[in-house]
Image (tube, rainbow, N blue to C red):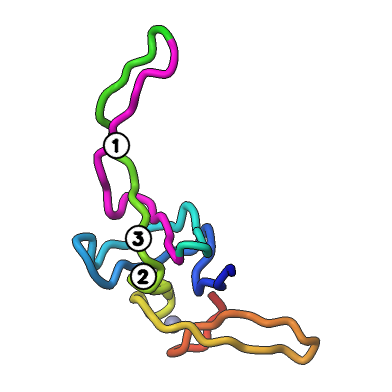
Amino acid sequence: MNKKLHVKTGDTVVIISGKSKGKKGKVLAVSPKEGKVIVEKCNMVHKHVKPRKMGDQGGIVDAEGAIYACKVQLYCPNCNKAVRVAYKTYEDGTKARVCAKCKEAL
Ligand SMILES: [Zn+2]
């Protein structure tokens, strides 16, 4: 079952716990199935890469590791900090995410 996450690809989020706490970055990928997200330049891990073809260099590269979506919060440029998300339904039925604090659309 796919759980809907409160963040989506392209969102700017802040890490609220773990070793990358306080870091801000863009969501590169989300995995609703695992409830995880990958945030640009956050939670860097060493990945061992095998050379796949001749002339390719294997070795260790730095890559973003997936972190639980519950450990990130959406960043509100208006409040200049991580905020909770609220949902707003417009008269025509469309829903939008807004900042729970300043009600600015995110
Ligand atoms: Zn705000």
Q: Are marks 3 and 1 in contact (CB under 8 Å)?
A: no
Residue picked out by circle 2: 72
Q: Quadrant of residue 67?
A: bottom left
Is the shortest distance between ligand 1 and the CB of mark 2 under 8 Å?
A: no
Query: Which residue occupies 33% across, 16% down?
Result: 57
Q: Nearer the viewer, residue 20 or 34?
A: 34
In this view, 15 is above or below 60: below
Q: State the extent of the magenta-drawn residues as a range.
A: 35-53
Q: Nearer the viewer, mark 3 or mark 2?
A: 3
Q: Position of residue 66 (x, y in %)?
A: 37, 55
Mark 3 or mark 2: name the one nearer the start of the chain.
3
Residue picked out by circle 1: 47
Instruction: Using the numbered discs, state the Cα–Cα distance from disc 1 to disc 2 in whole angstroms.
Output: 22 Å
Q: Which mark is residue 67?
A: 3
Q: Are marks 3 and 2 in contact (CB under 8 Å)?
A: yes
Q: Position of residue 35 (x, y in %)?
A: 45, 66
Mark 3 or mark 1: name the one nearer the start of the chain.
1
Q: Amino acid at mark 2?
A: Val
Q: Nearer the viewer, residue 29 or 76?
A: 29
Instruction: Using the numbered discs, state the Cα–Cα distance from disc 3 to disc 1 in whole angstroms.
Output: 15 Å
Viewport quadrant of the N terminus: bottom right
Q: Position of residue 34 (x, y in %)?
A: 46, 62
Q: Nearer the viewer, mark 1 or mark 2?
A: 1
